[in-house]
Amino acid sequence: MLELLTALLITTLLLATALPAMSHLLAQQRLAAATNAVMTLMQLARSESMTGGPVMLCDANHACQDFATTRHLILVRADPDNPVSPAPGPPLATLTLPHDTTVSWSRFRGNALIFRRSGILHFQNGHFQLCSGSTGRRIVMNWAGRPRVERAAGQGNCTE
């Protein structure tokens, strides 16, 4: 019985030591999955713009009028005559991030990421900041509409 209690005590101590590392690893994996989901939505936006006209990737909570820190993204067609406003009609795609993950769009101007018919951005560049707790990643967009991912731990608005 004493040996069994000793083994149980050692197992409990090992689990208590490993738990913080495992929770941090899970948060990083959730953030990586959310980053991949946003990248997929951006690739869809670029391909849709080249086949069907300008599109907007924006904050679904504000109906493309503003881009605040959010968990809900929406992809809609842009008005061909006024590409900074959405065209009427249903959304092309939506994305809801996990409950502990948020995204914000930092840009030079505009309230949405707008792809022109050629697949390049509409006079924009900037980055999406994805945060999960204090861990973050950035998806940096260049004017040609090509993204790259950077780690953003300890930077930006990713603080608890």
Image: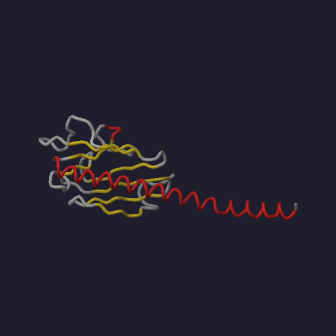
Up/down of 141 relative to 59, above or below: below
Residue depicted at 32% across the width and 63% down the height: 148
Residue depicted at 21% across the width and 34% down the height: 88
Q: Position of residue 154 (x, y in %)?
A: 46, 61
Q: Position of residue 22 (x, y in %)?
A: 58, 60
In the rendered view of the protein, which quadrant contains the N terminus? bottom right
Q: Position of residue 139 (x, y in %)?
A: 34, 58
Residue depicted at 42% across the width and 61% down the height: 152
Q: Quadrant of residue 155?
A: bottom left
Furthest residue in direction left, as rendered: 81
Q: Nearer the viewer, residue 3 or 136?
A: 3
Furthest residue in direction top, as rendered: 88
Q: Quadrant of residue 14?
A: bottom right
Query: Quick check: 68 left or right of 18?
Result: left
Q: Position of residue 36 (x, y in %)?
A: 38, 56
Residue depicted at 41% across the width and 63% down the height: 151
Up/down of 13 relative to 53, above or below: below
Query: Quick check: 117 left or right of 153?
Result: left
Q: Nearer the viewer, residue 77 or 107?
A: 77
Q: Quadrant of residue 16?
A: bottom right
